[in-house]
Image (tube, rainbow, N blue to C red):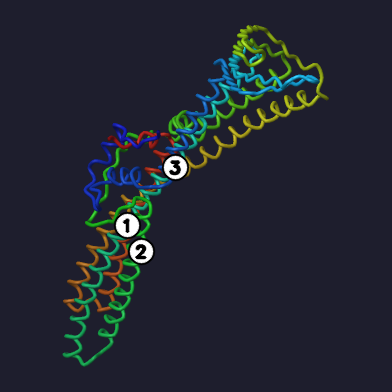
Amino acid sequence: MFKIKLSKYLCMSLLVVSTTLQAQSLTDTIESIQNNNSEIKAINYSNEVSKKSVNKSESSYLPKIDLELTGEKKKTKTKLDNNPTNTVDQSGYDLRIKLEQLIWDGGLTKSSINEAKYKELVDNFVNKVKSEDILLSGITAYFEILKYTKRVDIANENIQKNIDHLNIAQENEKLTDEALETYQAKAKLALARKILLDEQEGLDISKSNYKRITGNNITTTITMPKIEKNLIPNSLKKLIELTLNNNNEIKAQKQNILRQNERSLKQDSVNKPNIKFYLDYTHDNDLLAEDTVQNNYSAKVVLKYNLYNGGSDQISTEIEKINLKKEKTNLETTANSVIDQITMQYSIYNKSLKRIDELKVYLDSNKNIMDIYQSQFEGGMKTFSDILDAWTDVYNSKKLLSDEYIIMNEAYFNILKLSGQLNNIQKTK
């Protein structure tokens, strides 16, 4: 069964999280998905079926033994002319054991077993991709909660700041009898409250989505996890090499090629002779003849070879060879798609790190501007509108920086998935 277990490196990056819910961390989020997500459970059952299919194919090498047992009771009446009726009661049984053993079938059984093994590997890799997608959706839901939790905090701060501004405007109105600043502050406050409602709505939706995926509710505040940057190679070329070797979609397609090759070999073997051994034992007790016990033994080897069937086998062989070419082409398509995705996520991740640095400067500068404007406003050098605009810049820069951390983290985990490093996130029992 596919289980979820934290790899050594990813565990280091996740265990530092102090989180929410009935789970305590991002690690617990993953465990919740494993325990509660119905799609994960279905994937586990699918893996079991694939394994059983291999066992079923391997059973073709084993002998086939049939037992037939017949019991019978009969009464026979005979009467000759002018003679009394003669009645004979007879009962008996017949026991038959038949054994059939495959000796050689041109490699058909061997190819069938190999095909089943490759299919199991294909299914496992495909199911790992599906599991990773579900895990990634849970991680994304986790970060959505982080994003909107932070946004709600910033929105509350924004409201409080605008309440302070309204108080200042109302005090000034009492002195100057001028209502403009009051209206400006009220407008900003109304917008701030509307923004808070938007962010609270986003938080409610993200929590609902989280519960759908994990089966758990968020109950406390969660924080941003620390990431292990050394899991990401320092060049796109190295990352692509790592991805081509470890990506589970690519691995699945490689196994598909091997599986299709076995299908071609299996079809070739249909045109070859088939040899089987048969052993037959029959024990008859009074069934054929009264007061007679008879044992029969039979052993034979049968060769079956189809000489002509209209050419359908040859056509089937050609079809399987064409399918093999198609699977090889599909590998190229899959690899190109994965390379495109990893290139995009790598760009987002690295640009996001740089944007975070710039946004930190942007936030610090806006805070300094706000402080200077506040001082100059008190000295009569700046207007009330300048103060409101300066705070809006601070608010927006805080929001931008907070959102950028989410973008960077989501790109980070997307890279881990695409490069096959998310595949080892498995829950330890």
Q: Of helix, strand and loop, which one carries label 3?
A: helix
Q: Which callout, 3 or 1, points at the residue further toward the start of the chain?
A: 3
Residue annotated with mark 3: 42
Q: Which mark is residue 121?
A: none
Q: Of helix, strand and loop, which one carries label 1?
A: helix
Q: Amino acid at mark 3?
A: Ala
Q: CA distance from mark 3 to mark 1?
A: 31 Å
Q: Amino acid at mark 1?
A: Lys
Is label 1 in contact with label 2 (beta carbons under 8 Å)?
Answer: yes
Mark 1 vs mark 2: in front: 2
Q: Of helix, strand and loop, which one carries label 2?
A: helix
Residue annotated with mark 2: 202
Of residues 429 and 327, the one nearer the viewer is: 429
Residue annotated with mark 1: 147
The relative height of residue 338 versus residue 207 in the rendered view (above or below) is above
Mark 3 vs mark 2: in front: 3
Q: Which callout, 3 or 2, points at the residue further toward the start of the chain?
A: 3
Is disc 1 surrounded by few (<14), some (14 to 19) or many (20+) residues within 10 Å?
many
The C terminus, quarter of image: top left
Numbered disc total:
3
Horizontally, residue 106 falls left or right of residue 49, namely right
From the top left corner, tell me how far across and down residue 160 is, in percent.
21, 72
- Is residue 244 among what the camera can see? yes
